[in-house]
Image (spheres, rainbow, N blue to C red):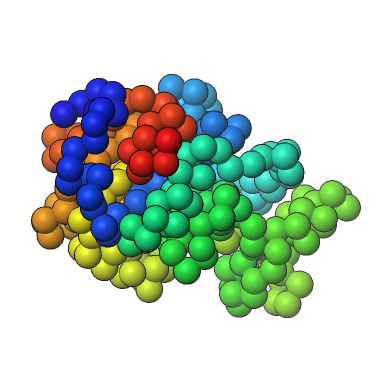
Amino acid sequence: MTGAVPDPLPDWLRDARRVTVLTGAGVSTDSGIPDYRGPQGVWTRDPDAEKLVTLSYYVADPEIRRRAWRMRADVRAPDVAPNAGHRALVDLERQGRLRALLTQNVDGLHQAAGSSPEHVLELHGTVHAVECLSCGDRTSMDDALARIDAGDPDPACLVCGGILKSATVSFGQALDERVLDAAAQAAADCDVLLAVGTSLVVYPVAGLVEVAAAHGARVVIVNAEPTPFDGLADLVVREPISTALPRLVGAG
């Protein structure tokens, strides 16, 4: 079924007791954070921007690093706040029906909305920290951006002098195996997998949909554009996420 949120909701969705949610960039667009692959996405408008989040380019080219740091400094938005989609997932947790919240987003808006950190698995890391690629020292993004503001265009690790990078998973960089294993367990142990605002083209995360379906879960996809897994889904919703998600989880 593809289209609007059905009214009434299917019994299998309304009665689900273990819902695993997978979110992508689309859930944060109503908070003013652009997605990547949509019609107005960052990489759609500037394909070269993808190099900024590709590890091989970042390590090899100081100019790419300087551009990446300028981008981080320019997109600071202290007034960015969670939207109705984020808050709907907090409601799902309060209902006692959330198995896990798996997110490809690095913005921290799920936690800012009130989702419990123990329920949130940040598959692609967080933009609120930086890590040294040599020694692994981890510090805050605010500290790194203060160095940018002070005139250092490519701040090095203060411990070993190595290359610093946001604590996000870049293309060509492996996901944390412990986080990915926990996500796979959550996908295998749910009644419903709800994929929201994700293009489902990046593996291994996209494969979590297949894991859930293979273990008998129903699949719901909420995304503005078609995904490779629409044919596998029990329900595909094309409505805006901030209005669809509260209705899907019975929060509005």
Depth check: give the residue in front, 131 or 128.
Answer: 128
Viewed as shown, does residue 121 lie left or right of 209? right
Inspect this view and state whether residue 209 appears: no
Position of the N terminus by quadrant: top left
Q: Is residue 90 above or below residue 38?
A: below
Q: Is residue 147 above or below residue 224?
A: below
Viewed as shown, does residue 32 lie left or right of 14? right
Q: Position of residue 201 (x, y in %)?
A: 30, 42
Position of the C terminus by quadrant: top left
* Picture residue at 54% right of the left edge, 31% below the top: 30
* Picture residue at 62% right of the left edge, 67% below the top: 131
Q: Position of residue 94 (x, y in %)?
A: 44, 57
Q: Quadrant of residue 212?
A: bottom left
Depth check: give the residue in front, 58 or 42.
Answer: 42
Q: Position of residue 238 (x, y in %)?
A: 32, 25
Viewed as shown, does residue 114 lie left or right of 80? left
The number of numbered discs placed on residues in the rendered structure image is 0
* Picture residue at 16% right of the left edge, 53% below the top: 217
Residue farthest to the right, as pictured = 150
Q: Quadrant of residue 156?
A: bottom right
Inspect this view and state whether residue 32 appears: yes
Q: Is residue 205 above or below residue 134?
A: above
Q: Position of residue 114 (x, y in %)?
A: 56, 55
Q: Is residue 139 above or below residue 243?
A: below
* Picture residue at 57% right of the left edge, 50% below the top: 113
